[in-house]
Image: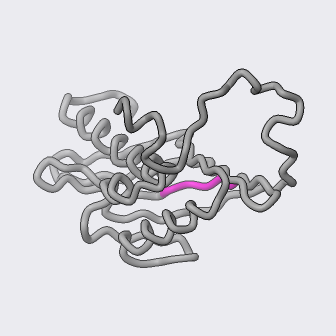
Amino acid sequence: MVKITNIETLLAEQAIRKAVTYYSRGCDRCDLDIFKQAFHDDAEVRYGTYDGHYEKFCEDIVAGNLTLQDTSHTIINESYDIDINNNKATGEIYVLALWASEGFNYTCSGRYIDKYESRDGDWRISFRQYLFDWSRTTKYSGDDPNEIFSGLVYRGSQNKEDLSYQIL
């Protein structure tokens, strides 16, 4: 059903979206504190490259992202099934991840298959399974060889120097 049946379900979905956003923002800003806010303390992740407790996964991702030139984890589509009476939900989140390193650009598309729980009104991820769909690798051709983006002088960064920390 596509119909919103009650305000509690709508509020739960918004809280879940916020947890999903914390994941992407924490990952790309290499901010472990924000990254971990996406998960409940006992959450598990399954990626194949790492299966286990979320905390070590977050630490490994931040450490790895700090070695990359650029990263961007973009949420494309979201689908949720929320059981408000039992404080549980599931979701399928389409993600497009892009990063650059050592002369190459990488694009990876996949989906997060999630389980969420509300504990004392706090909706977070309790389980995340990543499904890999496709990827592309291309040679890096320079920041802007045709100067299409030359007027865009405000750059993001992978740390707390990023402008978002001054405003958010």
Vertically, is 60 above or below 72? below
Q: Position of residue 36 (x, y in %)?
A: 34, 59
What coloring was used for the rendering? Answer: one colour
Q: From the viewer's side, name the closer residue of 102 and 61.
A: 102
Residue at horizontal 34%, vertical 41%?
A: 18
Q: Is residue 160 left or right of residue 132?
A: left
Q: Is residue 69 left or right of residue 40?
A: right
Q: Position of residue 67 (x, y in %)?
A: 62, 64
Label count reads: 0
Residue at horizontal 20%, vertical 29%?
A: 7
Vertically, is 167 above or below 110? above
- Whether residue 115 appears in this view of the structure is no
- Quadrant, the N terminus: top left
Q: In this view, which residue lies farthest toward the top?
A: 151
Give residue 8's quadrant in the image.
top left
Q: Position of residue 64 (x, y in %)?
A: 57, 67
- Quadrant, the C terminus: top left
Q: Is residue 5 magenta?
A: no
Q: From the viewer's side, name the closer residue of 55 and 113.
A: 55
Dominant SS type (magenta): strand
Vertically, is 103 above or below 9? below
Residue at horizontal 53%, vertical 70%?
A: 47
Residue at horizontal 42%, vertical 63%?
A: 128
Q: State the extent of the magenta-drawn residues as a range.
A: 108-112
Q: Position of residue 10 (x, y in %)?
A: 27, 32
Q: Is residue 39 left or right of residue 109?
A: left
- Whether residue 53 appears in this view of the structure is yes
Q: Is residue 129 left or right of residue 116?
A: right
Vertically, is 19 above or below 134? above
